[in-house]
Image (cartoon, helix red, strand yellow):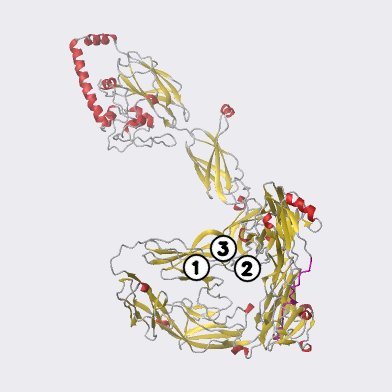
Amino acid sequence: MLFKIMLRKKRLSAGRVPLVIFLCQVISALEVPLDPKLLEDLVQPPTITQQSPKDYIIDPRENIVIQCEAKGKPPPSFSWTRNGTHFDIDKDPLVTMKPGSGTLIINIMSEGKAETYEGIYQCTARNERGAAISNNIVVRPSRSPLWTKEKLEPLTLQNGQPLVLPCRPPIGLPPAIIFWMDNSFQRLPQSERVSQGLNGDLYFSNVLPEDTREDYICYARFNHTQTIQQKQPISVKVISVDELNDTIAANLSDTEFYGAKSSRERPPSFLTPQGNTSHKEELRGNVLSLECIAEGLPTPIIYWVKEDGTLPINRTFYRNFKKTLQIIHVSEADSGNYQCIAKNALGAIHHTISVTVKAAPYWIMAPQNLVLSPGEDGSLICRANGNPKPRISWLTNGVPTEIAPDDPSRKIDGDTIIFSNVQERSSAVYQCNASNEYGYLLANAFVNVLAEPPRILTSANTLYQVIANRPALLDCAFFGSPLPTIEWFKGTKGRALHEDIYVLHENGTLEIPVAQKDSTGTYTCVARNKLGMAKNEVHLEIKDPTRIIKQPEYAVVQRGSTVSFECKVRHDYTLIPTVTWLKDNGELPNDERFTVDKDLLVVADVSDDDGGTYTCVANTTLDKVSASAVLSVVAPTPTPAPIYDVPNPPFDLELTNQLDKSVQLSWTPGDDNNSPITKFIIEYEDGMHEAGLWHHQAEVSGTQTTAQLQLSPYVNYSFRVTAVNSIGRSLPSEASEQYLTKAAEPEKNPTAVEGLGSEPDNLVITWKPLNGFESNGPGLQYKVSWRQKDGDDEWTSVLVANVSKYIVSGTPTFVPYLIKVQALNDAGFAPEPAVVMGHSGEDLPMVAPGNVRVNVVNSTLAEVHWDPVPLKSIRGHLQGYRIYYWKAQSSSKRNRRHIEKKILTFQGSKTHGMLPGLEPFSHYTLNVRVVNGKGEGPASPDRAFHTPEGVPSAPSSLKILNPTLDSLTLEWDPPSHPNGILTEYTLKYQPINSTHELGPVVDLKIPANKTRWTLKNLNFSTRYKFYFYAQTSAGSGSQITEEAITTVDEAMASRQVDIATQGWFIGLMCAVALLILILLIVCFIRRNKGGKYPVKEKEDAHADPEIQPMKEDDGTFGEYRSFESDAEDHKPLKKGSRTPSDRTVKKEDSDDSLVDYGEGVNGQFNEDGSFIGQYSGKKEKEPAEGNESSEAPSPVNAMNSFV
């Protein structure tokens, strides 16, 4: 397909190599190119190109020249008005008009006076298409009048008194520049004590004897006429109190005394301004100067503050020893009350200056020339601002539009003229005048209605030659009305060009971003509109790049030897290169020792001066390449090793080629200290925004001593350079001179734009403001715009100062808004900002979730379901749903404590959730609420539910009472958590013999209402282990275990006593004790070395009677027990231990536990108390630490373990 240039939709690519061509703009502002080919027959209304300033002060000693230049086709004729009436230059022999121009020359040097030609002049340039007018040029001759002669009496003052020497210069045009000097034309020294005011007077806060002199002279310099006028000298004598008394008696008749106040110290008082308050009015863009000068002894110090804000940091300057406050580029935001404070050791005084900033008109959008074809529509827009708001008026060909000939295609709407269905007679020049009491703006903009077929202005068969892999730009400058469309073809067969390979610009230029060899050929540009078609052919040739295939190399040679550098170049065979050698970026020395032979540079008899950087430069007509090498010259004989160090700092920094956005920096390198400089680092300081902070700007090769630096607008630059060699970095150079770049519109907009409401009826728009460096100019403001996303409202916009937040009030609750924040300054607006979406403030939800349902899963878990709340009633961002639930309390408990409510939150739009950790056999109540960013909505109706029974906990305690020969009494407390209605207790018990073997199990059921039970018919002197647990309808609970011994028969006891008195038995026991002691020592040693405890044997000896028969490979599960119960089950009571007198043993009183056999990890339990931990053999213990220290078993316990 053909690729067409639709000029109204494409934009010119940025960053491309600029072309010297005529840029045809979009049809709303099409400028007619004044190309000679077009000017021969293309008509154009007049345009004023040059005129004298509005306030034109002339030198009365020279001829008066009032400029007025204009262009147009046919060439315009010129006429003038003076003071509102026609100025007939033919009747005044002293006035002539330059040929082909409207510039007036008034010859007053031969005769006549400048005052005769004072007045208001206006130039009109007219042709058949309309008339353009100049500004009103007010012509006034400069004046430098003489001082009125006056006799000035000498002044005699007491030491320490204040003094004001008046200047009162004559009123000149323009106003004179005032300064004080002596008879030797030396400026008088000024300080915090003595200084010149804005009105030219010389102020002394207090006088000293050294102020005595007879030649205080005020001078007025009138720059326009280069003249200086001088006031009569003033004599001042400062004397002490004693001298003053003598002088009064002797010279009272012929000396003026400047007061007779005491010279004692005194607090400050203001010499100027007078009173406590004053008012100052200034125009926008000017320099605001506020002055306070105080007298006092000692000399007062002046301070400045702004009562309702802070002084602008980057625009505030102090002059005249802080007695004058200056704010540059003043704007309306600088209005307010400023306070100056004068202070010394005896007190302080202040004066308030009320500042009002007004503004002469300034352009928001000046009207632009309009080129239309017959039948088209267009508009002229003229927008200006000021304080007060300027009035907009329109003129047509220099005449108010109201009285100009009527044009049916024209309609005026305030600051806009709308054209529809224009015809050739609609051509005219329109003037927009914006004026208020402080000035006016006048702009000419023509409407030129043309019907022209396309014309291509680029020369036919132009040949373009481009290096391969570089961009190729083929011109097709054109003109036509209506605006033509452009098409490009390649080759004679008309092969179409595709958008993915080529870039086509608005001005008709075809760009090949990366030209290749196959890009060579003939290209045809075709321009079409409804009146015709034009085409042009151009030719493109692609050349091979020039390359240096053998570069010169770094060399170190001895003094007096010969060195050579080689530079081999490869190039396109059609291009002829020239190879040039440079030394230190300059020409080679004119010395026969330097010879160039083909690819070689040879330097014979090398001297110290020959050291430096040698560069080979290969040039063709299309490209240039270079390569460099450094020559270091050393002494021919051994010398002490050189001292290598970092370079000395560069010096002699200079700024040249100062442009708006670039500058050239040059410097002189310091000594490299025997290590060649490899690079230079350039840094900059922004004295306006970040004084004292240096930023990286660029790095260049160590062979360069200049750099072209790219700059940003409205930055007060200073530069410094640091040299780097293989040792390190030098100290920075001294800072260069400062360079302030011009202001420009901001290049970026604020970031992090957000819109969130803090209240239900507002929208808080926040953003990250630009920093001072990014502002690009004074008067940084932000245009904040917003509108509802789903509505048809127009954007609402406000301009705010340099802040980071704006609050929109009166918004509906939680409505999506489109938001954008655009930066602007006095130079203009930043690019159109991106649009982000925010929401106005949230409010609490209005509706509770409905249809709440509870499904009880088991005794500790329930599932809750509910219907979602309608999104509109949420009135905010849905955060989730929140369930409040609580256990119903009995009336007695409810009186004792507050009901504890639990809360579970479910994120997002979930409509169900699980309630874990419930207590079995309990009554619960719950409700559900929806949650947004503001908070919770109303609660749903309470929903009650009941959990079923669960297994009980273990009995609270188990006591063994009243042991006899054949009976034991058990007493217990019920479970602390029955988790239901107890149905019965189960008691299991079995005997344990002397070898720790367990006997048969007896199972006994006990009614639930019992808390005491006596077992009878037991064996005497026998140890029993008891297992006791409660039951509900849900099953058996956790068990509690205990051990006890029936009493010993008396006859058996007597027999034991008889045996114990036998000698053989005593000897046997001693031997056994000795053996036990030896075994204890061995066990103690093994235990400390990490020996393992026989867990398996102990488990077999004390296993639960119901678990004991299980095999290791059996896949079935034993009875469900808790962690503590299992630990008690596997542990018999040690012999030799003593129980309390009441035979009570609680389950937590055991000396042994699973921790002793496990890995030191606490057991874990499910929510219903079931054990989910893991049981394993005991590992080797770590070294003793804290309460976990290992202890050797006592002999008594060891003895019991062997019984």
Q: CA distance from mark 3 to mark 2?
A: 13 Å
Tell me if 1156 is positioned left or right of 52 in this view: left
Crowding at dot 1, Cα within 10 Å, few <14 / some 14-19 / many 20+, comes out as many
Q: Give me the residue at 32% from left, 26% from top.
A: 1131
To which residue does mark 3 refer? 774
Q: Is residue 474 above or below residue 239?
A: below
Q: Earlier in the sequence, mark 2 or mark 1?
A: 1
Q: Is residue 352 visible?
A: no
Mark 3 residue element: helix
Select label 2 or label 1 by which is in front.
Answer: 1
Residues rendered magenta in the picture: 128-150
Q: Quadrant of the C terminus?
A: top left
Q: Are marks 3 and 2 in contact (CB under 8 Å)?
A: no
Residue 1202 image offset from top left, x and y in percent? 25, 21
Q: Is residue 105 visible?
A: yes
To which residue does mark 2 refer? 827
At label 1, the amino acid type is: Leu
Q: Give me the residue at 33% from left, 34% from top.
A: 1158
Q: Identify the mark at residue 653; answer none if there is no mark.
A: 1
